[in-house]
Amino acid sequence: MSASATWIWTMASVVVVSLTSFIGVVALSSNHTRTRHVVFVMVSLAVGAMFGDAFIHGTSHPIGIEVHDITPDGPFAPGMVVTVEPGIYLPERRLGVRIEDDVLITDSGNRVLTSAVPKSVDAIEAAMRRRGEAS
């Protein structure tokens, strides 16, 4: 495996772990006791601490009337939809990985609206191979 492929594999794996962790935090917070702002900041700081300058944007934002709705403080509430989109970018290597899920807050936790989209490195590579075979 080339050095670039190793970096991409590692970055994608870390992004998937971050994505899964954030969705878990949203589920735990959907009992409406934590504010959305605290959850967004908490996860952004954790990801930022791990990746420093390679993590250059927020981890999440609400989706509503606007694609990037304002992030007001307050509890999660059933019916809200938020993105979960950690990313790592290494401009000096011309590499970047960002994987996004959209999550619906429900009475019982959450539902990942984009669950059918491949996210692991293996699943993405398999989808790319199938796409190549179809063309």
Image (cartoon, rainbow, N blue to C red):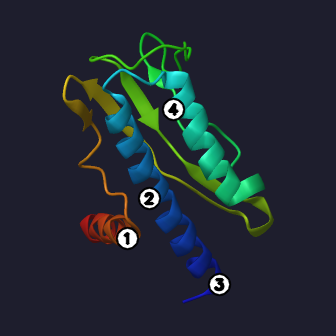
Name the amino acid, label 2.
Answer: Val
Q: Which label sits on residue 125?
A: 1
**SS class, disc 4:** helix
Picture layout, residue 118 above or below residue 72: below
Query: What is the x, y in percent for residue 130?
Result: 27, 68
**SS class, disc 2:** helix
Mark 2 or mark 4, whichever is nearer to me: 4
Residue matched to label 3: 3
Mark positioned earlier in the residue sequence (2 or 1): 2
Is 124 on the left or on the right of 42, as rendered? left
Q: Are marks 2 and 1 in contact (CB under 8 Å)?
A: no
Mark positioned earlier in the residue sequence (4 or 1): 4
Neighbourhood count class around disc 4 (C-alpha, 10 Å): few under 14, some 14–19, many 20 upward: some
Mark positioned earlier in the residue sequence (3 or 4): 3
Mark positioned earlier in the residue sequence (1 or 3): 3
Name the amino acid, label 4.
Answer: Val
Q: Which label sits on residue 16?
A: 2
Residue matched to label 4: 39
Query: What is the x, y in percent for residue 45?
Result: 65, 43
Q: Report, in whole angstroms, how far the alpha carbon at label 2 lies from the one at label 3.
A: 20 Å
